[in-house]
Amino acid sequence: MNTLTQDYTSGEFFDELIATGGQPRVAARALFEHLDALDAADLEERRQAVNAAIMTMGITFTVYSEAGNIDRAWPFDIIPRVMSKKEWMRIEAGLKQRLTALNLFINDLYNEQRVVKDGVFPIEVLAGSKNFRAQCQGMTPRFGVWAHVCGTDLVRDGDGTVYVLEDNLRVPSGVSYMLENRELMKRLFPELFHSSSILPVDDYPARLYDTLAALSPRKGTRPVVVVLTPGIFNSAYFEHSYLAQKMGAVLVEGSDLVVRKDDCVYMKTISGLRRVDVIYRRIDDDFLDPEAFRPDSALGVKGLMRAWRAGNVGIANAPGAGVADDKVVYAFIPKVIKYYLDQDPIIPNVPSYLCMYEDEKDYVLANLDKLVVKPANESGGYGMLIGPRATPEERAQFAELIQANPRNYMAQPTLALSTAPTLIDDHLEPRHLDLRPFILQSDQLYCTTGGLTRVAMKAGSLIVNSSQGGGAKDTWIVDVEE
């Protein structure tokens, strides 16, 4: 191998590309053979070309800060994450199993609540849920599906086991970056895509459209599908506009829509009002309808919940789907899978401790220096404590928060997250990463081939979120004989 690959050492962690002994894993062999033919100058030239393409294509994300909202170019690493098709098939089956159970669970919670009556899911957890929407009780959306788009975060531990870290069911984001990452890599390494069996991801917009179109209340006509965005200042606005364009849908803001006396949703156009059949909403529940939720919301559409409950419009994800998007609820999902499907989970949860239980709370408080503590409803890596890297003062502060509101906190062991080679300056270094595949459900189930690999660009960091210094890699699922 050349100096670039020969000098790489994965350290003490499971490495996605390099096996024990320093040899590339079977699925990554073609990639590393190709890298052998390149020197650091070649890679730097390609990296500069990718960075220029990112700027030209306007691939950005927004960081919220005290100094104001800052648009930044998408941080992208040109060394892809590689997995074999054989391993991916098992992961895909596990993701489909999980979303199927989650949707049965959500539908049950808003209707008969059998899972509570049968003692599988504690009533006190449901009572303490910030995302349970009383306005949705008694409602069953088309196909019984509430979470039509799910972004499930996966991690791999030091022994190679893949775990579900969390489910994102409210307004999961990141799929546009997965698609753009692939386009960038095709420009960067066209010869590898020609010679290797790298499975495609570019069918996602069509699959998303089909998932949404199936929710239309009007059959026999081409449905009018819109993407509802909070507007240009939202951190994911690039994705909203990107997906609308790729699907051939209309990008709208709340002020572009109106609900009339017939409880149907209409879009304002230069030709007059046009009925809307399906809304892919990228607005949180609280702001979706000022008539049903926050009355001060200027982002939503007054009367939207009336139209949805009347069956006159499909909404994805459905209001209230976030009841299962809770880090405390997460701990019960293996039981939920068993309860509804009579199956053991294909992909396990990370072992978890719930502070609502006295004995588990005592364990967490006694081991804050060893655990990761998470609040129930935060996202983006905010509001959490990484115990081994926290100061005594930070751990003491979290102890007070846990004591004050035990239901709001859960803890997990600090996993030895897997790493992958990442181009740092002119050499490769291991960086921790996770993976967010996207799963779709309406009348069919679909899972992306791979997903968005997020990587912590800082040495030793476990925080992969782009808003906190993380970056991304393309994810290659390779059909290769093992």
Image: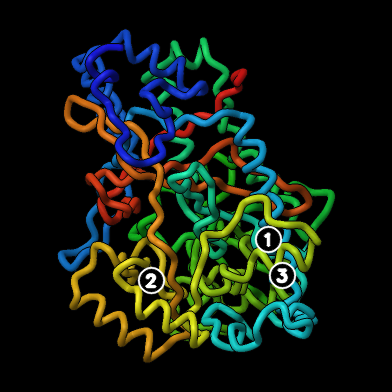
Q: SS of the residue at dot 3?
A: helix
Q: Amino acid at mark 1?
A: Arg
Packing grade of label 2 (10 A; few <14, some 14-19, many >=20) is many
**Where is residue 317 drawn, in percent x and y?**
61, 62
3D distance between C-alphas at marks 1 and 3: 32 Å
Q: Residue at x 17, y 30 (%)?
A: 425
Q: Is residue 421 visible?
A: yes
Mark nearer the N terminus (1 vs 3): 3
Q: SS of the residue at dot 1?
A: strand
3D distance between C-alphas at marks 2 and 1: 46 Å
Q: Is residue 274 visible?
A: no
The colour mode here is rainbow
Q: Amino acid at mark 3?
A: Phe
Q: Amino acid at mark 2?
A: Val
Q: Are marks 2 and 1 in contact (CB under 8 Å)?
A: no
In the image, residue 69 above or below residue 357: above
The answer to whether residue 259 is left or right of residue 36 is right
Q: Residue at x 34, y 51 (%)?
A: 464
The residue labelled by disc 3 is 105
The residue labelled by disc 2 is 373
Which dot, 2 or 1, sits closer to the camera? 2
Instruction: Using the image as rendered, state which of residue 347 and residue 312 is in the foreground.
Output: 347
Quadrant holding the N terminus: top left
In the image, residue 285 above or below residue 151: below
The residue labelled by disc 1 is 275
